[in-house]
Amino acid sequence: MTLPGRATPRRKPAHVLANVPYRRLWTSMSMCSLGDWLNIIALTALAGNLTQSSGYQVQSLAIGGVFVAKMLPAIVLGPLAGAVADRFDRRLTMVVADILRFALVLSIPLVGTYQWVIVATFLVECVNLFWVPAKDATVPNLVPKERLEEANQLNLLVTYGTAPVAALMFAALSLPAALLGGMLPIGREPTTLALFLNAVLYLASAALIFNLRGIPKGHVGHAAPSVLRQVVDGWRFVGGNQVIRGLVIGMLGAFAAGGAVVGVAKIYVETLEGGDAGYGTVFGAVFVGMAAGMFFGPRLLRELSRRRLFGLAILAAGFVLALIALVHDLVVVILLTVVLGACAGIAWIIGYTLIGLEVEDRLRGRTFSFLQSTARIVLLLVVAVAPTLAGLFGQHPITFGPELVYRFDGANIVMLAGAVLAMVVGVLALRHMDDRKGVSIFGDLFAAVRGERFAPEAAEERSHGLFIAFEGGEGSGKTTQSRMLAIWLRDQGFDVVQTREPGATKVGMRLRAILLDAAHQGLSPRSEALLYAADRAEHVEKVIRPALRRGATVISDRYVDSSLAYQGAGRALDQEDVARINSWATGGLTPDLTVLIDVPPSVGLTRMASPADRIESEPLEFHERVRREFRALAATDPDRYLVLDGTQAQNDISRLVQDRVREILSDPVPVESEEATGTMPAIRD
Ligand code: TYD
């Protein structure tokens, strides 16, 4: 029983796979996906094997034919099948489709002719046109609305995740086929075994779905619009935005590079004397690489601009593809194929994320479905066209001597052309979507490899303005000192901007009010750090950078080090995190000189006149930690810090500051007499 006024304890929602009917459907989907991938590998391999004696050209065309037969039904009959599938009972549709697929696939090795391979492939794809919409419409029947997203992700996982599994299974099947070949009644090919396995998987799926009682009798519901329609509609709004257009073209280019290898893998591997196991491995290598790229991509080179990483990944994909085309060694080709897949995976995931950030909420779903359908079409097109073109080019051995023959066949030409295309797309992406124009890409890349942000802004601005920050604990006298330095520099004729944190901008003033209001005692450390960083971002963008750009000297009372000391050490947040958000907030802008005025908190806090604000009223240990951190920061880079004992007389301190600043000024300033420093304003910190 629930007591009034008490919330019912919320049970942790069970995983979507805990739902038995959905789990069954998902299992059946996994089996079918695995079957589908085995099917495509086995059939292309079989087509190659059946036409082996007819020469390179015929063989390539034969393999291209299988891909075309696979692709055609979805494009030509897609909308029609969708409308017809609409009328039938979903469960029955899936069961009948599975049995038909079982029979068709089984018949392929039994008939054993190339013509039947093509006809059966075409028919299996026609049946798929019914199975897929029935399955898609069933998922929302079995899964509650709030779990649909999770279910969709799982669906995507099995659709692509089964590809490398199937490829490796196919490669592994070559072993028993080689061992048991003599004993098998039909053929000694791994293709036969793979097709048997494929057929059995469809049959098992039929049995599972037959027993799935949870599917409502009703018909499929509204069929999804045809792939072609989605693409045409999608381009209307995607094409209008330059950045999104660039991302989409880049992503498809990267995908196509992977597709080119898949398309010609069979014939290429054959010229490298790799056989079926080699083919399966190359096929799997693309997908293994892609999965790795998608997984590690977002974590890669964090300091590098994402748009640049995107362009570089595509460029690298092109480069690796060229190597694959030129290096004639199966092991090297397989390793390079993993790298190629990884580059494509990185480009895909980075592009996907960037689109997610650029496209407004309302259009995001449509943009992604557009991408998925175009990617499918591009992949199928490339996979079909690549071997066909390779066949048309034929074989071109280049003879360097009686022993030395370098084969430059159609497969190599097609891959090289694809490589050039990917490189062009990569360069265009780098040029048109660059968000760090004027910054050397190599400098950026090398810095990112070292885990640093390349900060040319600082280098470029140093030659114009000068940036000096004052840091220190409460009551250290740094505000007074920064004012005195400003006065002195102005007297020398310098253009000086004296500013402070927090609160130097309009927005900053409001943030300052929140941050220092003693009423906000419970503010969480992370929000505190973010608010200071927000104030700083605004400060850098609106005040500091513009001033430096025009050649002024900027003197800021507090900067990034305050956050490292107060939020990092004081609030015990992770230093790296605080450093990272601040480096992001400031675009990597660091002061040319930081003056740290160091006083023991016991002294500084007693100097305060007005009532303590939220930070000042922290306990003494807090301020001790802050002080230690300031000193530690200064110790790491003595060239960029001037540490002064804040208990000295103000005049002495200001003279030491002037001496140091004089060293870094572009125009020399003469050493003056003591009187010139004028009267001291009262300490205000
Ligand atoms: P302020 O009155 O300007 O203090 P001071 O005169 O000592 O500079 O208030 C700034 C307060 O905000 C100060 O207590 C230190 C704190 N602070 C941070 O905790 N993190 C930061 O990044 C900055 C800039 C200030």
Image: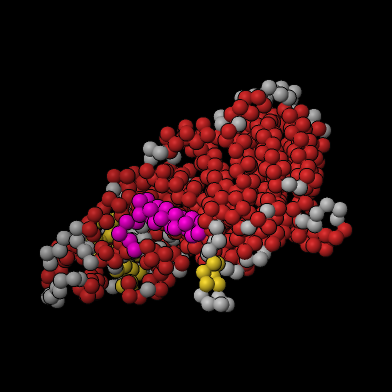
Residue 348 in picture, x, y percent from top left = 51, 50
Q: Nearer the viewer, residue 677 or 79?
A: 79
Q: Decide if residue 609 is in sight here.
A: no
Residue at position x 25%, y 66% in the image: 462
Residue 425 painted magenta = yes
Q: State the image quarter where residue 303 is shown.
A: bottom left
Q: Main secondary structure of the magenta part?
A: helix
Task: Name the side, left or right, on which 311 lies relative to 13.
Answer: left
Q: State the image quarter where residue 287 is shown.
A: bottom right
Q: Quadrant of the C terminus?
A: bottom left
Residue 560 painted magenta = no
Residue at position x 13%, y 75% in the image: 670
Q: Nearer the viewer, residue 313 or 266?
A: 266
Colour setting = secondary structure
Instruction: Give the residues drawn in magenta, as a range.
Output: 413-440
Residue at position x 78%, y 44% in the image: 111
Residue 465 in picture, x, y percent from top left = 22, 63
Q: Nearer the viewer, residue 572 or 444?
A: 444
Q: Quadrant of the N terminus?
A: top right
- 505 above or below 578? above
Marks counted in the figure total: 0
Task: Name the side, left or right, on which 640 lies relative to 170.
Answer: left
Residue 615 in picture, x, y percent from top left = 41, 54
Residue at position x 35%, y 75% in the image: 638
Q: Decide if residue 194 is in sight here.
A: yes
- 253 above or below 5? below
Residue 498 in picture, x, y percent from top left = 23, 58
